[in-house]
Image: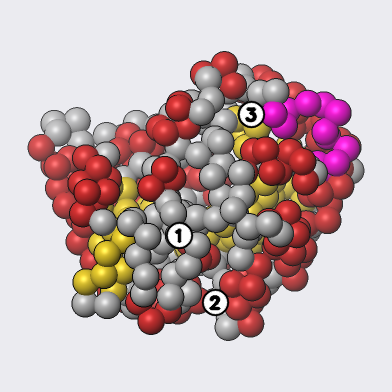
Amino acid sequence: MSCSGEYVEHDEIIQIKSSIQQQLKKAKYGVSDHSTVELCHWTKKSFKGEESCYKHKFYGISTHQCMEFSPAGMYCENRCIYCWRPMEFYDSLEMNSQNVAEPKDIVIKLMAEREKLIMGHYGDPKSIHKKLDESLLPAHYAISLSGEPTMYPKLPDLIKYLRTLPQTKSVFLVTNGQEPLMLQRLIDEDALPTQIYLSTNAPNCDSFMKINKPRYADSWERWNQSLELLEIMKTRTVLRMTMIRNHNDFEGMIPAFAEMIKRSNAHFIEIKSYMHIGRSTNRLARSDMLEFEEVSHFSEILAKKSQIYSVIDESIPSRIVLLQNQQRKINPFISAYA
């Protein structure tokens, strides 16, 4: 496999270059081969009995037992202006199936890396040891973090493996929609996650290109193929809309957004503000964040315009509002399916 500078090979398995690994580890990532894991802001707060992630409020996910990771840590087809991940290191659009780690190996190694990250919190007097103990065996897996997980060629087997673990209650997958063929594989191979998110931030091709800065010439077509697959997926589906001031928050865009979400027929719509954190601060300003009241106002108008969605929940600290499809109504709480 040729190397463009980002990766080197070791025992035929793709490795993130050591200099980049050092930067990732300094940023508190765990790294194994081409995969990454991290303890998010909300997980760390939950260790102390403080606020939990909005996914706990919306879907009943246990924040301290959530493992957020990616099997494609430094791979992505887009260079989204709002991304807070280290996308400056991305420079490849191919993961050869002959050179990737096996799903079981990824999970075992990342669990060990995650455990190292957790151990440091036992020394914090504010930490609740019972929560730390419980966190060592994840109940929820969020396949997102850095990179685009649908680029990992063995993703169906990875999701199937996670399902076999006795503690697993749910698996979430977040995708940018650039790999519709992989999404079709998840359907065909009975490998759908508990809930799948499609990142959504533009109602038309022009704004899509400006916000996502995709590497594929047919990126808009790929994304629309993914959008149309949501309706036939036999799992919970979500459109996650990231709103950026003066980019996609115009009320004039609402009719097009309304048609888009109706086409998807997704169970839920999450509408959230861009957050001025991480690497995104090099590209956007703090003023590009919307206040919660602005997100709420936009959400109310969009729900009304769609005629099939309604606002059912919100999280002010995360500046996010949850809409539900009233024609495909299901219980938001994952525990209802356990």
SS category of the residue bearing label 1: loop
Q: Residues within 10 Å of mark 1 (few under 14, many from 20)?
A: some
Instruction: State which quadrant residue 9 falls in.
Output: bottom left
What amino acid type is highlighted by mark number 1?
A: Ser
Which amino acid type is shown beneath numbered disc 3?
Ile
Q: Per the image, is 212 magenta?
A: no
Residue matched to label 2: 191
Instruction: Say whether disc 3 or disc 1 marks the residue closer to the N-terminus.
Output: 1
Can residue 262 be spotted in the picture? yes
Q: Which residue is mark 3?
A: 244
Look at the numbered disc 3 and give the secondary structure of its residue.
Answer: loop
| In-image side of 122 versus 135 (left or right) | left
Image x and y of residue 137, in percent: 27, 61
- Per the model, the C-alpha gap separating discs 2 and 3 is 33 Å
Name of the residue lying farthest toward the top:
287
Label 2 or label 3, whichever lies nearer to me, is 3
Q: Is residue 38 left or right of residue 270?
A: left
Q: Is residue 250 magenta?
A: yes
Q: Which stretch did the figure color magenta?
A: 247-258
- The answer to whether the residues at label 2 and label 3 have Cβ atoms under 8 Å apart is no
**Image depth: mark 2 or mark 1 in front:** 1
Q: Residue at x 59, y 72 (%)?
A: 182
